[in-house]
Each structure stands twice: as structure tokens, then as C-alpha cells.
Amino acid sequence: MSFPWAEHYEPKLPLMRWIDEKLPLPRLVYNAVGAGYPVPRNLNYFWNFGVLAGLALVVQIVTGVILAMHYAANANIAFLSVEQIMRDVNSGWMLRYVHANGALMFLAVVYIHIFRGLYYGSYKAPREMVWLLGVVIFLLMMATAFMGYVLPWGQMSFWGAQVITGFFSAIPLVGEPIRQLLLGGFAPDNAALNRFFSLHYLLPFVIAGVIILHIWALHIPGSNNPTGVDVKGPQDTVPFHPYYTAKDGFGAAVFFLIFALLVFFAPNLLGHPDNYIQANPLSTPAHIVPEWYFLPFYAILKAFTGNFLWIPAKLWGVIAMFGSILLLFFLPWIDKSPVRSANYRPVYKWFFWVLVADVVALGYLGQAEPTTFVVLASQICAGYYFAHFLIILPIVSALEKPLPLPNSISESVLHGEEQEARPIGQTA
């Protein structure tokens, strides 16, 4: 998937030609994100979210490095150091709000990116490695976000660390030693805060490295597209620059507008007021809840209330919570349909939107008081989540009759998707 002139690229400026001879970086950029990288001509705005995630990561790294210059990873003064950043450091309040809300925006963008992949079948061959690396990035992001949430050392930070690390103690034999290794003791304190600060500082650079592998893996088969039809030739593609750099630029402008509105007008909209109270190990908050991006998985954890066989309920909850994410690794082999895009899979499309509603419901239930109704609803929604991937998806992929596909991307763009349909077996 390349243009004929991409392999013969030569910089025009003498300085760039010299750099390209010594280190072919200009050629790499040209072929990776420039006119030398051909992209399907029918990508919609849902394909902007990969670039937006990269921009969000850059914002997090830059603001995080600056905040680390003023933060003190000591349980006695961590909370006060955050307050000093807010009050005494020049533009410290803005840096902190940009970093805190940047994590929320980053996760929101990645969630949309994941669901776009689920809808358009971007996990299917030949892009399995792209998907697997994406799931690895998601797991690293979750770990980084959790450790960052602990650092302000407010009430919700402390008790969140207590609860989340407590999950490991449910694992027989090795669980408690693992928990003590994570915390550096029997409860969150200085050792835990130093560990979390070090890892929170390090992991974004690990994420950046995995993102490079993610993009590299993407450039081998090329981008998927809304039809799911393979690229047939140059007529199906356009250069990434200027066509999609302009489109991504518009998406970035909208993204940063929403980001600015959140930072300057509602910086604590999604935060918890208890985290503005200094951590107190002797005072448990009335209702401990994680950040919104953890809520669906937290609801799955809370759905298990009774022992089953020889396994206690707490261990079942931990297994289900981690299993709900690890399940995504096997998705390319669970869904065996030869058609990628849900636009041509009428049955799968309905179940996809039911899954979206189910995850949103789990998010709501994750922050709700654990009444009898909430627990029952959590159990039903958690059951459906696993049923969707392990039961419904294999059955639908085997029995569903897809709609006719267009012969090519250019045909779907220029002549409509209804003309000259071809057999299903000629896709993928």
C-alpha cells in the first residue's frame, strides 16, 4: 500500500538532503505521516481519535514533567505540595487542572477509539497485532491513571489505593505478598507513594514506546476503513498529507476547545470533593468510588456477592474485573465473520449498540450506592458483557447473513454502496 513516488522521495532543501543522507528521518516522516503514506479515501471523523490520543499523551507528558518538579512524594507533605502548586507556583493551578482533566480527556478519546474499532472490525486480520498493542496501551493507561490518582494524597486517593491494592489479597497464597510488595508495607504510606510516583512518571514513556509499535504495526497492512473493504489500488487512497492532516487539524481544534472549556470553566466537574481533604487512615469516606473510566469494571467487581464452589466472592470479582479487559485480547479470534464493518452486518450492529448501552449502564452502576436493585442490575449487565463476547458474538458471526459489499472503496465513495455488490467471500 504505497504510492509509486514514495520510494523515490528526496528533500528539496540542501540541509534536509544532508540530514536525510546521514539519518533518513525526513524520508521516514514523509512515508509515515506525509504525502508518502496512502490512506483510504473514505475515512470519517472517528479515525481522528488515534491522533487525538497521541496529542493528549504529549500534553500529559509535558505537564507531568513540570508538575514533578514541584511535587513531593512524601505522605506527610504530598497533599500540601499539591496545594502549593495550586496557590504559589506560577500558573500551577492551570498545569494541575490541565494534567488532571487531560487524563480524563485521554481516556475518553481512547474509549471512543476502542468502540470505533469494535464497530468497524479493526481488530480483524490482517490488523490483529495493531489491536493487541492497542489493548496493551489501554492496560498501561489504566495503571498510570490509577497511580496518578493516588498522588494528591487526598481521602479518595488514599482509600482508592487501599481498595484497589486490596484486590490482590484475594488471590490465594501469593496475593498478600504481592500487595505488600506493591505498597512497600501493610498499608498505603511513604513507600507506596514513592512507588506510585516513580511508576506514574515512567509509564507514560513506556506508553509512548508502545504507541510507536502500534503505529508501526498499522503501517504494514494500512488503515482499515468504514466499508471494511481492502484497498485495490491508488484510486482507493489519498495521501495522508494534506487531506487527513487537515481533517485531524479540525478534530484537534474541537478537542482542545472542549478541553479548554473543561479546564477553565469546570475543572472539578468529574473530580470527587473528598479528594480535597487530606488523607486520613482513621476516617473512611462514606462512599468510595474510583474515577469514571474505572466505573464499568468496578461495577463488574461489585456484581459478585456470594461464594461459588470453593472460590470466595471477592476472588470471583477480581477475576471477572481483570478478565473483562483481558477478554479483548482474544477478540480477533472470537469473531470469525469475514466482514469487518458493522455497516454490512445488520444483526451484529444491533448487538454492538446493546453492548455500548450495557457499558454505559455499568458505568452508572459502578458509582451508585450498592442497594439490592443496583447489585442485581450490575449482575445482569456484567453477565451480558461476558455473554456478548463469549456467546453472542461467535453465534452471530457464524449465522449472520451480511449485506452485499461494494467492489471497492472508490466505488462506495463515488457511486454509492448499493451498486455492483460482490460475494462476501472476497473480502478480508
Image: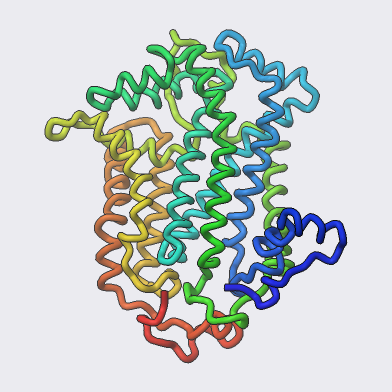
Question: Where does the N terminus fall, quadrant-wise?
Answer: bottom right
Residue at point 79%, 55% (across, down): 19
Residue at point 82%, 57% (across, down): 18
Name which quarter of the figure residue 14 lies in: bottom right
Residue sitting at the far right:
14
Q: Nearer the viewer, residue 390 or 124?
A: 124
Picture layout, residue 274 above or below residue 204: above
Residue 31, given in percent of the width and then of the height, sits at 67, 64
Q: Nearer the viewer, residue 202 or 312?
A: 202
Residue sitting at the far bottom:
420
Residue at point 34%, 39% (across, down): 322
Question: Where does the C terminus fall, quadrant-wise?
Answer: bottom left
Picture layout, residue 18 above or below residue 210: below
Residue 172, given in percent of the width and then of the height, sits at 23, 25
Name which quarter of the figure residue 104 lies in: top right
Report whether 208 appears left or right of 173: right
The number of callouts visible is: 0
Name which quarter of the figure residue 265 lies in: top right
Picture layout, residue 156 above or below residue 302: above
Colour basis = rainbow
Report whether 209 appears left or right of 249: left
Residue 262, given in percent of the width and then of the height, sits at 67, 40
Residue sitting at the far left:
309
Residue sitting at the far front:
22
Picture layout, residue 129 above or below residue 196: below
Residue 402, given in percent of the width and then of the height, sits at 36, 77
